[in-house]
Each structure stands twice: as C-alpha cells, then as structure tokens.
Image (cartoon, rainbow, N blue to C red):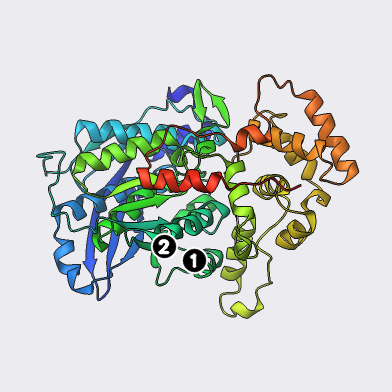
Amino acid sequence: MTSKLPDKAIKLRERHPSFRYEAYQITPTTNSIELKYHFSIAPEISFRPVLNLPLMDPDSSERLASDPLVNRLVFLIGMVELLSYWKTCCSPTIDVAAGPLSQNDLVFWEHLIRSGLGEFFFTNQIPPSIDFKIRTTSTQKVTSDHYPSPNHLAPNSFLILVGGGKDSITSLELLRRLGNSDKPQLTAFSLNPIPASLESIKVAGYPAPIIATRQIDPLLRELNSRGYLNGHTPFSALLAFVSSLVAYINGYRYVIASNEASASEGNIEFHGMDINHQYSKGFEFERLFRDYVKNLGAPVEYFSFLRPINELQICALFSAMQSQHKVFRSCNREQTLAARSREQLSSDASLAPKRSGWCANCPKCVFTYLCLSCFLPQEKLTEIFGVDPSTQPEFLKLVAELAGLTEHKPFECVGTYEEVQACLKHLSDNSLLRPEITLELNRFLSSIRIQHRKDLRGLLSTWNEEHLLTEPLEGLLKQALSEIRLAS
C-alpha cells in the first residue's frame, strides 16, 4: 500500500516509522482536574497537549483522580487527541504505552482513524486503507471491558454541548421547556468557547456554564509550516469523550449534542470509502461511541437531541428564536481570521479589527443564508450577516457546490443536496431573492435531474427514526416541530 501513497507521505513515514502515546497525567487542582498528555514521534519529536476540566465540587478532585473509570476515560481522550499529531506523518506504527487496549478497543480505534480522518486522507490523496498498526506496549492488562463505578449521577440532569451556532442554540432554547416538569438540571458546556457560545448561553438564560479548555502543542503548527501533513480531524469525537468525562465527574446523567440527521450524508467517495467531513457528527459514530462507553460501565449517556430532524427543520425552529439572531455564529472562516488577528496583536488586543462573525462568502455562510431565507425576510438576514450574501463574488459558485453541481459537497458542516435543492426551488418559486439571482437558481434547478425528491414542506415534516432520544425528549421535539410555520 505504501507504493500508492504520495511521495511526501512515503518520505515522512520512512523518516518517522513510529508514533508513541507515552503517558497521561491527572493533576487535581482547587476546582478542576488538569489532563496532560505526552506523545512522541521517533526519532526526535515530542508533543505535550493539555486539557483542563472544571469541577463543581472541588472537594472531589482527589477522589476522582484515583477513580478507575476516570482514569480510563482520560486515557481514551488521549487516544482521540493523538490523531491531531499522528496525522503529521502517518507513522506505520502507533505504539500505546499509556494504557492497555483490548481487541474491542483496537477495532473501535482503527475504524475511527480510517473514517474520522477520511477528509484528511482525501485532501492529502492518501488511500484510507493506508497500512498502519495500533499496538499496546503497556505492561498493564485489560482485566475487563467494564469498569464498575458508583452511580452518583442525578437522574434528570443534562449537560448541553454549545458551539455558538444555530444547532446548539436550538437545543438550548427548546430544552428550557423541560423546566415545566420533573425539575430537570440543565447546564451548558463548552470547550474553548468562542464569544458567540458564551453569549448564546447567556441569552438562553442558563446560569454558570461549565467551561473546559484545551491547549494544542504549538509544535504542531510549526511542523505544518515545515511541510508535514495537515488536515481535518474528528473534533466531535474528542468532544464526545471530553464531555462524557465532564458529565461523570460533575454528576450529570445525560450529555446532549446537537447533531442532525443531515450530518450522516457524506461528501464524496474516495477509494471505495464514503468520505464525510461530519463523520463524528453522524449517527454511525454516535451509536458506536454510545456502545463503547456503555461497555466501559460509564453511567453517562451521550446522544444528539436533534438527530431525528434535518437542517431545514432546525432553521425553521431557529428562525422563531429572535433573541438569538444577533448572537449566533456559524462561519469557521471568520472565526479563524478573528483568532489569527488576536494572536498577531496579542500585545494589544484592542487593536484587532472588529469582525462581524460572518464572512458571507463561504459554504457555511451561504448554506445558512439559503435555509434561513425560507423563513426570514431578506432585511433580517442582511442584519444578521452584515451584508446580503447573494451579492458576494462567490455566491453562485458556492450555491452550485451545495446543490450538487460539482465534484463533491463542500467540506463543511452543511446540509444535504436534497435540502439545498428544496431551498432553491422554494426560493425560486416564491421569488424570495433578487430577480437576477432567481434566474440563476432556475438555471441550476433545470440542470439537476430531481426525481421523487421531497419539496420544502415535505422535508419539514420528516422524522428520522435512527436516534437515541428518551421518550420525553422525543415528545418535546415533536411538539416543537408541530409549531413550524413557513414565512408567507
């Protein structure tokens, strides 16, 4: 298989034949536990990333640091974390010295590497069947796949993952309706939150969110600048493990993500494999992760509240949440530019240019704009984005990519071809965009052979049965969907 790899990958694998997960360390502090990891790449590279997880009960830090399940979850977080560093050279061997791995573990992690790094493999033209081996060099033994632990979790407690976009905000706002029954404990959680995350939590009325931090080893960026391999990693998989540990150490029963049915659609087929930018947001990962953590004996349950519905339904629900319209942000490009501005002007952050939070000229911005255009007036959308996205230079090119008129769907967290095509038809039929744009949309639609596809109203009434919701949450979401109204 090595002969089929690009020359750069071949040379890097020859120079760095072994990646090693050396160790992890749990350090209790006054109100948190600090997780330190040590990875190395033979012969001379070493990485030391750090995570800090808050504790609501500071007195529990010492006890939790010695809890067998906590230690196992911390070790497994390192297994996800190492992907960001292993991918720099795709070493043929991954030696795990930090802890033992069972055969079930090996199956899970090999599958996550091949599927979760699918986009990385595609962008670097590396076959996902690339030859590598995970082996444990730990002297410890896996005595059981099950780690019994006291079930100290509150029965009706929910830790809600918040990223600052419309999806997690929709969950925040809808889950507040649980407050009318059974006195649920609802707490927002965010890892390295952007300002929009914190603001959306505040606007939704959630007090005292739990905020965790993650520090990537700066050597990673330096290696990228020196020509080592780079690309997308399954961040949502890391978030699933981290949030489950945060829930366990703080007494929460459920971890609520906001991944929708649309996330399970891939972007392109590559070497016989479906490449999905959102793999770790898809249902396959959710199910595999849930089973994996359950087999450990963890009493925490992770699932996505929005799994039964699609992106159009989420936009329909979100369009009614007016207090959040100025708050939410879904543009990765603008977040990256803002972060770089802060880094470059770290000595005086006040000099950093003010940014709207939307570039209005990338796949996520255009997709969000198209969907919301079905439910909100154009003046409201211009207010949200700071500009009319349909006037931007890349608009029609991006619409074509989103609608399925190019080689593959953009590698972003966007909806399905069917959803975009339904949007375009609705916008065109109802003349909701500028006349010259509507003409182009009609041209796009005429070149797409659509047979037996649902229209917008049909997609707004769908329900995906592949989900892991509890009955009360299923009822709550169905009730919210029954209130959807299309803008006239």
- Within 10 Å of disc 1 (Cα), the crowding (few <14, some 14-19, many 20+) is many
Q: CA distance from mark 1 to mark 2?
A: 7 Å
Residue at screen point 54% across, 69% down? 203
Residue at screen point 50% across, 30% down? 126
Residue at screen point 11% across, 44% down? 140
- Indicate the quadrant where residue 36 lies: bottom left
In the rendered image, which residue does mark 1 sit on? Answer: 201
Where 389 falls versus 6 (above or below)?
Answer: below
**Mark 2 residue element:** strand
Name which of mark 1 and mark 2 comes first in the sequence.
Answer: 2
- Which image quarter is the N terminus in? top left
- Taking the image as shown, residue 144 lies to the left or right of residue 379, namely left
**Mark 1 residue element:** helix
Amino acid carrying mark 2 in the image:
Ala
Find residue 12 and report its horizontal and vertical position in percent. Answer: 45, 38
Q: Is residue 384 visible?
A: yes
- Taking the image as shown, residue 400 lies to the left or right of residue 408, namely right
The front one of 75 and 284 is 284
- Within 10 Å of disc 2 (Cα), the crowding (few <14, some 14-19, many 20+) is many
Find residue 211 and report its horizontal and vertical position in percent. Answer: 40, 66
Q: Are marks 1 and 2 in contact (CB under 8 Å)?
A: yes
Residue at screen point 54% across, 35% down? 124
Q: Is residue 412 visible?
A: no
Find residue 299 and report its horizontal and vertical position in percent. Answer: 22, 49
Find residue 227 and report its horizontal and vertical position in percent. Answer: 54, 46
In the rendered image, which residue does mark 2 sit on? Answer: 188
The numbered mark at residue 231 is none
Amino acid carrying mark 1 in the image:
Ile
The front one of 187 and 216 is 187
Find the residue positioned furthest to the right: 436
- Taking the image as shown, residue 111 lies to the left or right of residue 66, namely right
